[in-house]
Amino acid sequence: MKVGIDMGTASDGTSVPLDIEELLATRLLVQGNSGSGKSHLLRRLLEQSAPWVQQCIIDPEGDFVTLADKFGHVVIEGERTEAELIGIAGRIRQHRVSCVLSLEGLDIEQQMRSAGIFLNAMFDADRDYWYPVLVVVDEAQMFAPSVAGDVSEEARKISLGAMTNLMCRGRKRGLAGVIATQRLAKLAKNVAAEASNFLMGRTFLDIDMARAADLLGMDRRTAEMFRDLKRGSFVALGPALSRRPLPVTIGNVETSARSTSPKLTPLPEAVADVEDLIFTPDPEELIRPITRRASAPRPTTDILAELSRPRPEPVAATEPRAPVVEMPAADREALLDGLLAEILENPDAAFRADAELFQDFLVRCRICRVPGAPLSLSAFRRKMAVARSGVDPQTAASEIWASALILSRNVTDDLQGVFLLVAQSAVRGLPCPSDAMIARAYGTHSARRARRLLGYFEEQGLIVVHSDLSGKRIVAFPDLQVETAPGLRMRSMM
């Protein structure tokens, strides 16, 4: 079905249509300096296409939440756990509901992490739910930066990987990326290069004008025109818009953003006792909580200097301390295992981050007064992996299981739970775990990701995946000389 929406008017007064079906296959890049009208353009595109295609908006400033009142978009707050975002994204694709992921109020690192997790979950949706979705990302240079910034490497990789998947591989999964950026120079080239449609607005820096001219196939000498474009005016090019560069003035919109452009307003009349008005506190200020901003990070040299100082001599305690209760090592391990089992009894524990579970575990240890030094995060993850494998006490005491534990150290901490789950099934001769069981052990709902994990283990030479005559999956462990019983029928690992 061919659907054309009206984006605005050309210089000769004719309307400029945008072919939605073509856009879904070829993607769109919007560039313009702050105040050039990018958000207005995106709002026009979203309003005009809302009746025809499902939409997902990554909104760092909360400007597009107003679409919910008129067009029924679901507003998703970014302050959610990883498991919540993954679950919501899966249901968004399953039920074909348009949504706005509002990241307002989060710092840049949290925004990148939340957006990356959400987009990856949409990308990993089951094939049955690969319906077409228009994925609009405002301020895309934040989520796909061309160079590393002040954020952690982990957050940058999650966000950049999600944006790369969206623009490079999203088409086959029904995801059509529409990205808007203030500066092309700040946007990762492999993300920008995948767009075939362009709407270039006002820009002033030479490097951005040159890149815009190159993308539009224009002579660099004519790139100066981008400085003269008015607010709301763009140059369009692409199979969904125009085969030749076409100036277009974006049409009106029905909804408005919560934030507006600054406008001059008259100053208030001068007050005689202005000093008393300013320096006398309001009574409500005395009971209002003070919001403190996070201090700037300390220089590394200061931290190293502090660590190198000798520790002061401990001062004798003035109050008697509680006597230290000695506990046999076996009893302590049993107590730790019991606390871990209590945590895993919660159905949502499989989809919570390890850091959250670790904090919960430490609190329970303090409540139960577990003696000895607390577990480190890596040791906790190791115990969690063994617990998630579901191994029984008899198997856990066997030599072959000890060999399986040694073999599991060939994979990263986050994959050991999956590896041991399959290994204990092989050691005990149980059927191969299903995709859902493997996905849960990894903390995801994606069966496709579960199959990819088995493929990864096979690439590392740790397992061999094959099937019986009826096509049921069997996983063999060459180093352990064991294999699982036939499980469910095999599906493609890709």
Image (cartoon, rainbow, N blue to C red):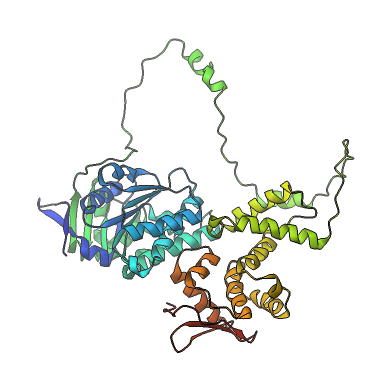
Q: Give the camera-side residue of 455 and 116.
A: 455
Residue found 67% across the figure and 64% down from its top? 383
Image side of residue 265 versus residue 367, left or right: left
Horizontally, residue 300 falls left or right of residue 76, namely right
Q: Where is residue 4 in the image (x, y as percent from the top left)?
A: 16, 58
Compared with residue 234, is residue 121 higher up or lower down, i.e. above or below? below
- Up-down: is 70 above or below 437? above
Q: In this view, does 400 lie above or below 259?
A: below
Residue at x-position 25% and y-position 41%: 255
Quadrant (top left, top right, bottom left, bottom right) of the N terminus: bottom left
Judge whether residue 442 can be spotted in this image.
Answer: yes
The answer to whether 396 is drawn above or below residue 77 in the figure is below
Q: Position of residue 438 (x, y in %)?
A: 52, 70
Task: Name the quadrant containing residue 20.
Answer: bottom left
Q: Residue 374's spot in the image, x, y percent?
A: 74, 55
**Residue 206, image x and y in percent?**
34, 56
Quarter of the image for the C terminus: give it: bottom left
Residue 229 can be seen in this image: no
Quadrant of the rendered structure where residue 345 is?
bottom right
Total numbered circles: 0
The furthest residue to the bottom: 469
